[in-house]
Each structure stands twice: as structure tokens, then as C-alpha cells.
Image: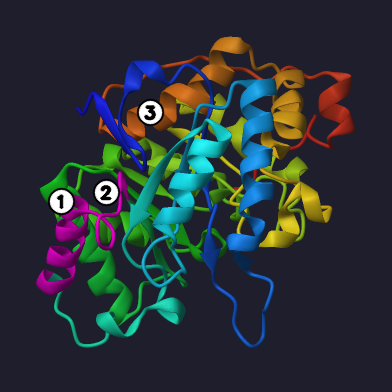
Amino acid sequence: MNSLLRTVTGPLSVTAVQGPVLAHEHLALDLSRPTDRTASLTAGHAIAVAGELAALRERFGLSLVVELTCRGMGRDPAALIRISQEAGVAVVAGTGWYHDAFHPPEVEDASVEELANRLVEEVESGMGTGGPSPGVIGEVGSHGDLPGEAEMRTLTAAAHAAVTTGLSLATHAQLGRGGLAQLDVLTAAGLEPCRISIGHQDLLDAPAIHRELAAAGAYVAFDTVGKERYQSDATRLRLLLALLEAGHADRALLSCDISRHGYLLDEGGHGYGHLFRSFLPDLRAAGADDALIDLLTRRNPLRFLTGGDGRERQPFQARTTVALQENGLAGREASP
């Protein structure tokens, strides 16, 4: 288990992170295409991004952001350093390859070994010339129930690099699908489940899959909080409560996955703070206490990042209250 985090401004002791962590965000990226020009957070948005993070630090104690913009996603290490310094919030940067629609040319003819070596070199030498070192592998992706051929190579290479470097690994599972297949690929390559976070599971209304991932030891990321166009927060809360009640509070991660400038508060979006302003109060109304909130928002992401395999059992039973009824949760059975 690592005691230091690799942040874009240098090593940071785990004990220095006293406030909440956003476990899956983007601060600088460019996924824009001819059919979608708004999927970007460029230099022109950096002031707004830093301002939001600074406000969250002041109001909620935000201490750390896990920034999962990897190769081929318009990653900007210099921007991450500036945003971190201006906001006063630590940032852990990622590396790896997103799903195959966004693979850069370097993936096309490369072997698993060549791809893994490229990631290891980046972790050891930094991103670009004199850039900071990544502190996590991710978000490495697939976009269906089973990874495609190129995605198999990038996922396997990412797992090998994680094993070699000691970093943990976060995935992108398109609309939550394919998480079990991702876990099979990554563990077959030698990576322990406790160092794997399966992404976007709040978009998949399948509590049984969430329980299976958590029981295997992987982290289950409810990381698109506030993206109502994809899934309602009421459904997200129901799915999270089901996982908590099943005894897997220590395997849940929370975040908002801000991935386009229209989500910023400055442009009328819900912003990075939606988790703290809206979702966590609803979770508290459902019965979560301070210890559980701290587990979900600080201790879990730190344990994930550092590769700790210890479990933290946190008993939880949702209370049937007016707040639950207002969220449409009371009396509802979890989907199979």
C-alpha cells in the first residue's frame, strides 16, 4: 500500500487529505468531434474550473480531484498544474487509453507489451517533456458488453502497467455496460480487484451486477452524479442505497464526471459541486451519517488510489422517511 499520492504538483501524503475527494472528474480535455463540438474543457474554461474547485474547497473542504483525462482525450498536464495551484486543491492525473472511438494512432499497430511500456515510461518520466507523473491509470475504456480487439489490448496493457508501477486503475464502461467483462480482463492480466474501479455504474440499473463487482473486491463508481440526461439522481440514489444495504459501502466511489463546458456553473450547468450541494443531502436524508459520508467521499477513494486491500465494513439501513418518499424510493424494490 502506497503512503504517498502522485499529484501534478508533487508527492502528497495520504494523511494530508482531510476533506472529500472527487473520484472521477475532468478539468481539461477535448473530446469534441464534428457531431459534438461541446465536449471540451479548454484553456478558456480554466478560470471557471479553478474557481469552482476553490469554492468547493472553501465551503465543503474539497481536498483532491482524480482527473481521468488520458491519452487521446486532449489531456493538458500544464493546465492541470495551473488549475490545482489556483484552486488550492490537489489533482491526481491519469494515463491510458479511452474507448476505441478515441484511440490515437499510436494504438493501431502496437502490441500489448509496447503499449504497457509506453504507460510505464510516462509514469516514471512524466507526461511530455518535464511534465508531472500520472498518479492513476485511467479512464481506460470499452463501449459494449465485451471489449473490442483494440480495447482488449489497451485494457490489458493498462493492467500490466498498473501492476508494474503500483498504480490503481479506473475504467470507462460506456453507459455502465461491460463492467464484469472489464474486471475479468484486468484481473486475468494480474491486477488485484482492490486496485480497480469500474466506471459509470450509476448509469446501469442492475444492482446484482453492482453487488457482484463489489463482492469481487472492485470499486463500483457512481461517478456521473447530476447528469440527469443519462440517468435521474433519484435512480442513482436508489442504486447506491441498494449497494450500501448489501454491505458494500466500502466499495462505492462518487463523483460528477464533468466532461463538457456546458456542465460548468459559469454556463448554467450543475458543476463539480452538485455531489455536495444536492446528492449527499439526499443520501443523508436516507440515513447516511457523517462516518458513512466520509467513507464514501474520502476514505474509499484514498484506499483505491493507494492500493489498500483492507475492507471497512459500514452497516447501513435506509430509513423509510418522507424524504425517501419524495425521492420515489420508499417501498420500491431494487431491480434484479
Within 10 Å of disc 2 (Cα), the crowding (few <14, some 14-19, many 20+) is: many
Work out whether mark 1 precedes mark 2 in sequence or the reverse, and give the earlier one.
1
| Residue 137 seen from this side | yes
Q: Secondary structure at mark 2?
A: loop
Q: Position of residue 250 (x, y in %)?
A: 43, 26
Return the residue at label 1: 124
- In the image, which is nearer the foreground, mark 3 or mark 1? 1
Residue 219: in magenta span: no
x 69%, y 72%: residue: 38
The image shows residue 80, relative to residue 57, as above or below, that is below
Measured in 3D between alpha carbons, the distance from the residue under mark 3 to the one under mark 1, in whole angstroms, is 21 Å
Q: Position of residue 23 (x, y in %)?
A: 49, 40
Could you tell which of marks 2 and 3 lies nearer the N-terminus? 2
User: Which image quarter: residue 100?
Assistant: bottom left
Q: In screen coordinates, is 327 left or right of 291?
A: right
- Say few, some or many: other residues with alpha carbon within 10 Å of mark 3 (under 14 / 14 to 19 / 20 or more): many
In the picture, the disc for residue 133 is: 2
The amino acid marked with disc number 2 is: Ser
Q: Are marks 1 and 2 in contact (CB under 8 Å)?
A: yes
Return the residue at label 3: 302
Q: Is residue 88 left or right of residue 170?
A: right
At numbered mark 3, what does the secondary structure look like: helix, strand or loop?
helix
Between discs 3 and 1, the one toward the N terminus: 1
Q: Quadrant of residue 279?
A: top right
Residue type at mark 3: give it: Leu
The region drawn magenta spans: 113-136
| Quarter of the picture holding the N terminus | top left
Label 1 Cα crowd, 10 Å radius (few <14 / some 14-19 / many 20+)? few
Q: Say which amino acid is labelled 1.
A: Glu
